[in-house]
Amino acid sequence: MNSPASVLVVAPGCPPELVQELFNTNILPSPSKVIVLLPPGNPWQYSHLVNAPGLSPTAQVFSSPAQSFFSTRHLKWIRRHLRSVDQVMVLISTSPYGNPTIAAVSLLMMLLAGKTITLLRTIDEPMAASPEPPDPKGADWHEGWFVITLNPDALAKEFGKTAWSAYPNFVKNLINRTERELCFYFECYDTVKPVNYEPLDSSPAALQKDLEHAMTVGNLYLDALPGGVAFLPGKKVLEVGPGINLGPMLMLACHGAQVSVVDRFLTPWDAEYHPRFYRLLKEKLLERWPSIDLKVLEMILSRNAYPPESIALYSCSLEDLLGIPDQSVDVVVSYDVLEHLFDLESAFTHLARITKPEGLGIHQVDFRDHRDFSRPLDYLLLSDKEFIRQFKERLGECGNRYRPQEMQQLLESKGFAVTAFQPTGFTEEQYLTDFFPQLKKSRRSRYRSCAAEDLRVNQGFFVLEKKTRESFHEGAERSWR
Ligand SMILES: C[S@@+](CC[C@H](N)C(=O)[O-])C[C@H]1O[C@@H](n2cnc3c(N)ncnc32)[C@H](O)[C@@H]1O
């Protein structure tokens, strides 16, 4: 599987040095190809970037055919490029709060692409210069790159209103026309940094712990495959939400699988952490399987990066995964990920779309309230409104509250047969005895009519088989009767 291309739209006002600097840092996900779309400007301003050999070996840089950013010609040109790619990034040089043009560009990109956009910007200006500075509480205000995900599903109303009067009329009209259908909302993740972007701990103790975890996860996948490692040669395997290293998938690759990963916050290559981690993994795999073929790991170590021939990287949410063709994947796996998805409907639609008929799914899910594992059901007491607010604020890290039965039903409705569900964690009896009456009394909770029995299992893994078209329809007819 080839890793996808991505488009980087450069917003007006970005100095050319910023584009250059972006390629010198490791902030960009590593797709096979980056298409850079320059804004209209004085030809001399950006011309040295077009086909510049020093920019990046994977970048193709195009100059706009138009005179102005907000012209129909320029926007059509951008839209044409957005259609075929999986990832869209916008490079801006200032806070989107501080500059109405940037705000308009962000909105426009969402309208044009209809998907989640990653904004890349530098924080090198005093935030106080912004008319409406965001609340810097807990934020990591430092010089350097910052990534904001703009999700078309949510809108920071105050942001829209502040900048509204300053939008060009063309943008106002465009937004008015499409607002109702898209009902787009901003989520500005300024104050919460995804765990995957935190600095990685390369101490020997931390590496050892991460290695053990990667082996546990990889072994869980192997144990659930029919025939274990013998099943893998030539099979296409996708892991959703791999986290900070790609150990489990590379373990499967060393057994002959063609592997890929998709993550909403793909951890960039870290020159301190990853080489050390993959050297340890190599030793561990060799110890366990003395005749294992380690060439994928060796290629990664020798290039100090993930070459596309070793593993395909999709830097987007599962909900937005368009880069993988229909019915092309033999096995999809995940470990402690499905509970973090914000839109399970579309995520499972993609899983069903990409999985081959009779293809497999192996998913370990942690159904606990991640805010406090010692009170694993407390989030069920919240109203939907309050829960959604907290879920978004924490980037889904608290867990999405789906119960095992609900998740199973949704998977089945998308065309998967649940061939096994193996519980791996249980709610403590004493906590459940105290909690259950509270849940019954909680008038705001959608879970108040849940049976206590349904709350006992709080971790487990699903083994799925994608039904063939015929068996899916037969099943639907049976349940209809
Ligand atoms: C709790 S971590 C688990 C990481 C890894 N599987 C492990 O066992 O250590 C959840 C992972 O899922 C990713 N994730 C969260 N929401 C996602 C989404 N909607 N689509 C794809 N990945 C997502 C996160 O970025 C993170 O890497």
Image (cartoon, rainbow, N blue to C red):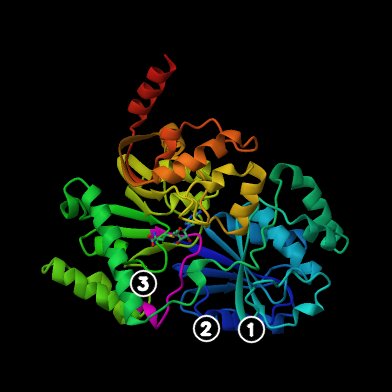
> Is residue 414 shown to the viewer in this render?
no
Q: Residues within 10 Å of mark 3 (few under 14, many from 20)?
A: some
Quadrant location, the N terminus: bottom left
**Does the stretch in magenta take in 273?**
yes
Q: Are marks 1 and 2 in contact (CB under 8 Å)?
A: no
Against 259, is 346 above or below? above
Residue 408 placement (x, y as % from top left): 41, 36
Amino acid at circle 3: Pro
Q: CA distance from mark 1 to mark 2?
A: 16 Å
**Does the stretch in magenta take in 20?**
no
| Label 2 vs 3, first from the N-terminus | 2
| Label 1 vs 2, first from the N-terminus | 2
In the rendered image, the residue lying farthest to the right is 165
Q: CA distance from mark 3 to mark 1?
A: 30 Å
Range covered by the magenta-colored residues: 261-274
Seen from the viewer's position, the closer of residues 476 and 391 is 391
Query: Residue tagged by mark 2?
Result: 24
Residue at 46% in and 67% down: 31
Query: Residue tagged by mark 3?
Result: 307
Seen from the viewer's position, the closer of residues 421 and 59 is 421
